[in-house]
Image (spheres, helix red, strand yellow):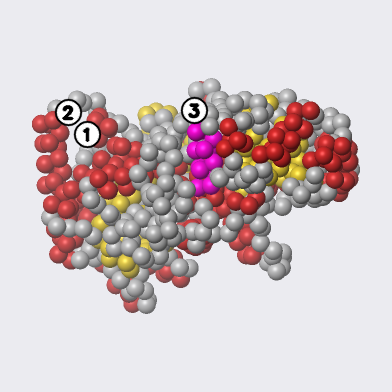
Amino acid sequence: MSAYCLSRFATHRRKSREVSVGPVRIGGDNPIRVQSMTTTLTQNVEETVKQSIALAEVGCEVVRVTAPNKAAARALKDIRARFDAAGFGHIPLVADIHFLPTAAMEAVEHVEKVRVNPGNYADNKKFAVLEYTDAEYEAELQRLYESFSPLVKRAKELGRCLRIGTNHGSLSDRIMNRYGDTPLGMVESALEFLRIAESHGFYEMVLSMKASNPKVMIAAYRLLVERMDQEKMAYPLHLGVTEAGDGEDGRIKSAIGIGSLLMDGLGDTIRVSLTEDPVYEIPVAQALAEKVMKNWVQDASVQPARDDIDPYQFNRRPISSVQLGPFTKLASDEPPTVITPVQHPIEDFVTIAAEAKIVRPRLGDAKLEGLLVKADRIQDLEHLSALCAGISGAAEFIAVELNPEMPLDEVSLALPHHPLPLALVRDFEDGDYNDYKQFVHLCAQFKIRPVIGLTPNAADGILAEPSEHSIVTLSRTCHAEPPEHRIGHYRQLAHRLKRWKNASPIWIRNLSEAKTLRSPAKRDEARANFLDKLLDASILTGSLLCDGIGDMVSIESETDLARSTRLAYNVLQGAGSRITKTEFVACPSCGRTLFDLQSTTQRIREKTGHLKGVKIAIMGCIVNGPGEMADADFGYVGGAPGKINLYVGKECVQYNIPQAEADQRLIDLIREHGKWIDPKPTPIEA
């Protein structure tokens, strides 16, 4: 039973302590605060102020600036003064500190908040394997106390705020040897610092548990809240997926991690980390915050409710196998299947398919697997044979969603011979047991897979009598407007299925309606519309996948066949549920970066993006290098200006390579380890 949130089935905002970051208040009843970070060299005061102003003008409420050394920390004084003079005294600045307590002690004099990474702040990592006795461990904690206490005391004197920002993969040797590179290790690393601060009566703190893997990130924040509750702590949370990357993939991965936690009521300030100009982070974060805050409630109507999923350890829900096509099977050991919705009426789509106007969307080796069509009238079923013939070779199966008002007797008479595997989808009211039995019998008669649309309160008889080949999804009546918690509805349904030992696969349907554009030619409006759909899909589908729920997915808010398919595969990849292309872990750049991350990431993506199942980390400096890459297969890390270090896993195998040679050397390294394949031309298939 999870205890990190009041209810797993409804959103109730966690009540956190309110802290002050200069004039901005975080936590408590305050809205979600949106943050970002400058990417300029901190000592270049003019450029750093210019970028800070650009961030503030697009709505950034807190600006973070790296301070990797004492000289950079001293530059914060002038940055703060010029930022104030430009009219932005209401926007607090945060110093980002790694490794150097002396830099933190300088920075706290000039800015409203200092972020320290507990894995780096007072520990020199040697990646040594040691067995600490209890006495040795206590001696290490005493050394940590002596190193961190001066910053705490000075922050208290000046009225500053501190962020204890733990990162997966950059934990101290002490933590690694006792807890491992785990969510528990991340939490314990932060708690050590919290206890020291509280011993001095200091409570103006924010916590973060960042990872590039959304599953790890989600588990760490959940565990942190549970452990803080045990110690009577209620510090606000800064949410973010670190090294999320760029483009659609970076936005999806961030939305999965941040959105999942926000929908559970956790989180007070967020940063969407993208390997792009930081001003592009702000609209994504704002849209994400606005979307989730509509679902938050803080009244007594939400009752405690939890399922039996282990929220701190990923385990996929076990299911019965269902064969959907020659090569498509729903099973516990198979990745989730993508089904693509068809927005045209069946009759029109038959013509499109017959005229070879349907183009198979492809993403690496991932093809169009299934199509979803709607039958609103009995006459629509008459076109199924022609549709199956028209798309043969382009898709493996068709799911037909029946209008629940259509009499099943008439459906039975109208069903034709179908040359492709077929599934029938129908919603049932909570007490429609007789209709359900008739529907399952009809599907068995025609050798069709039944898909049962249910509410979480479905009749026990339906839940207790699964068909051998049935698939379960939420009925459309559950897809209401906020504050309805659709993630919670799926969790509740999965919980009840388990109670009745019903192992039917679950189909996650993203049914949010696409916005109607006033002018399709308006690029900004079209971009905002797609972002809205991307966030909806990532939050709902990605969150459930990270909970181990979901065996088939569809993005039905997107009207374009190819974009809908691509988005579904990208959400699966972002959640780590199905890998169909190269996985890139790329830091968002900052003043420590030793090369242009945006152009480098794009260039490496163009050369290696066809390598299915390979994870490549692109890091601007050693701070975000061997530790932060965590589980990447290969790493491309800035070692010095104009020089690149290459990694296999966490081991540096080539040092100080001229950047002009580094791309090819990376490809050679991938080839040496047997993971390179030559790219093939993308076929245009009709």
Work out whether mark 3 precedes mark 1 in sequence or the reverse, and give the earlier one.
1
- Residue 162 as seen in the image, left or right of residue 146: right
Judging from the image, what secondary structure is the residue with disc 2 in? loop
**Residue at x-position 71% and y-position 42%:** 426
Q: Which residue is mark 3?
A: 669
Tag 1: amino acid: Arg
Q: Residues at badges 1 and 2 in contact (C-beta under 8 Å)?
A: yes
Q: What's the residue type where badge 2 is placed?
A: Tyr
Q: Is residue 364 visible?
A: no
Tell me how far mark 1 sits from mark 2, CA to CA.
Answer: 8 Å
- Residue at the spot 70% in from the left edge and 38% down from the top edge: 434
* Residue nearer the viewer, 208 or 276: 208
Residue 604 in the image: state x and y as whole percent.
54, 40
Secondary structure beneath label 1: helix
Instruction: Name above or below for residue 409 compared with residue 294.
Output: above
Q: CA distance from mark 2 to mark 3?
A: 37 Å
Pointer 3: residues within 10 angstroms few (<14), some, or many (20+)?
some
Q: Please name the residue shown 22% across and 47% down the image.
A: 231
The amino acid on which the numbered mark 3 sits, given as a three-letter code, is Leu
Q: Nearer the viewer, residue 319 or 141?
A: 319
Sequence-earlier tag: 1 or 2: 2
- Please state the horizontal and vertical placement of residue 518, each as a whole percent of the image: 70, 69
Instruction: Determine which residue is flagged by label 1.
Output: 174
Instruction: Decide whether the magenta segment is chiefly helix, strand or loop.
Output: helix
Span of residues in magenta: 488-499
Is the C terminus in the top left, top right, bottom left or bottom right quadrant? top right
**Residue 673 versus residue 300 in the image, above or below:** above
Picture disc at residue 29: none
In screen coordinates, is 280 left or right of 265?
right
**Residue shown at 56% from the left, 25% from the top:** 333
Mark 2 vs mark 3: in front:
2
Residue for badge 2: 132
